[in-house]
Image: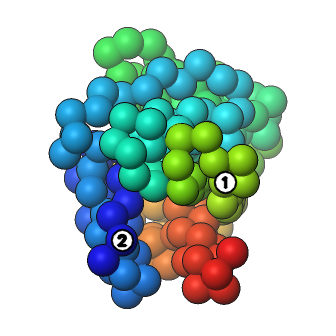
Amino acid sequence: MKKLVLASNNPGKLREFAQLLAPLDFEVLPQAHFNIPEAEEPHHTFVENALVKARHAARLSGLPALADDSGLCVAALDGAPGVYSARYAGEPKSDARNNQKLIAELAGKGDRRAHYVCVLVLVQHADDPQPLITEGEWHGEILATPRGTGGFGYDPYFLLPQLGLTGAEMSAEQKNAISHRGKALALLIQRLRAGD
Ligand code: IMP
């Protein structure tokens, strides 16, 4: 099996990526396995941050590396919180405070449209000049009151109007099949199968 370092220590992401990439003969290892510390995410776009994380993990492990960067972009807030989604309400990061801030910022606004974004970057080595990059989006609306207990982050407030469910009211399988991360990963797998 080909080893691939995941530039994240999130156990949920590791499980999902490991399961979906195993049929392609990849063994996915978390960067913690190599004692790699988290990279800085200093940029203003998802793709730049994902690229920095992937190159950092590849440089320190000597192996191909996969990184993702994701967040929520709200139309009425000019795309905020965007790349700052995890720390929208400051340090230490807290989903509860992030959601509180989001709802306060949207108070009285009629336009509730929002979408999640996920960018995946796969580099063969730290200086790879042609990284494999895929992106997925998931469109919905922000509710004023939370619903559901699944998912994480902004999911209890993220409504899919066609389904009548929030991200937190879906099973993990249901969410993975249609989410920004699921879509980006499906595209990555397609590109890997095509031998890109
Ligand atoms: P990261 O890509 O793991 O750094 O995640 C960035 C942040 O975006 C998370 O901490 C969440 O606040 C938000 N986010 C990304 N994807 C999701 C999702 O699927 N549900 C809820 N929040 C998400």
The CA span between labels 2 and 1 is: 17 Å
* Figure quadrant of residue 44: top right
Q: Badges 2 and 1: C-beta atoms under 8 Å apart?
A: no
* Picture layout, residue 33 above or below residue 43: below
Along the viewing direction, whichever of 85 and 122 lies nearer the viewer: 122
Expressed as whole percent of the image width and height from the top left, the position of residue 195 reads 64, 81
The quadrant of the rendering that contains the C terminus is bottom right
Along the viewing direction, whichever of 137 and 162 lies nearer the viewer: 137
Taking the image as drawn, is residue 31 in sight?
A: yes
- Residue labelled with disc 2: 2
Element on which disc 2 rests: strand
Element on which disc 1 rests: loop
The quadrant of the rendering that contains the N terminus is bottom left
Which residue is pictured at 59% across the width and 77% down the height?
A: 192
Expressed as whole percent of the image width and height from the top left, the position of residue 30 reads 27, 50
Q: Residues within 10 Å of mark 1 (few under 14, many from 20)?
A: some
Q: Mark 1: which amino acid?
A: Pro
* Dot 2 beta carbon under 8 Å from ligand 1: no
Mark closer to the observer (2, 1): 2
- Residue labelled with disc 1: 131
Judged left or right of residue 30, residue 95 is: right
Which residue is pictured at 22% across the width and 41% down the height?
A: 34
Which residue is pictured at 19% across the width and 45% down the height?
A: 33
**Mark sitting earlier along the chain (2/1):** 2
* Picture layout, residue 152 above or below residue 29: above
Which residue is pictured at 61% across the width and 40% down the height?
A: 127
Along the viewing direction, whichever of 6 and 43 lies nearer the viewer: 6
Expressed as whole percent of the image width and height from the top left, the position of residue 102 reads 56, 28
Taking the image as drawn, is residue 114 in sight?
A: no
Q: Residues within 10 Å of mark 2 (few under 14, many from 20)?
A: few
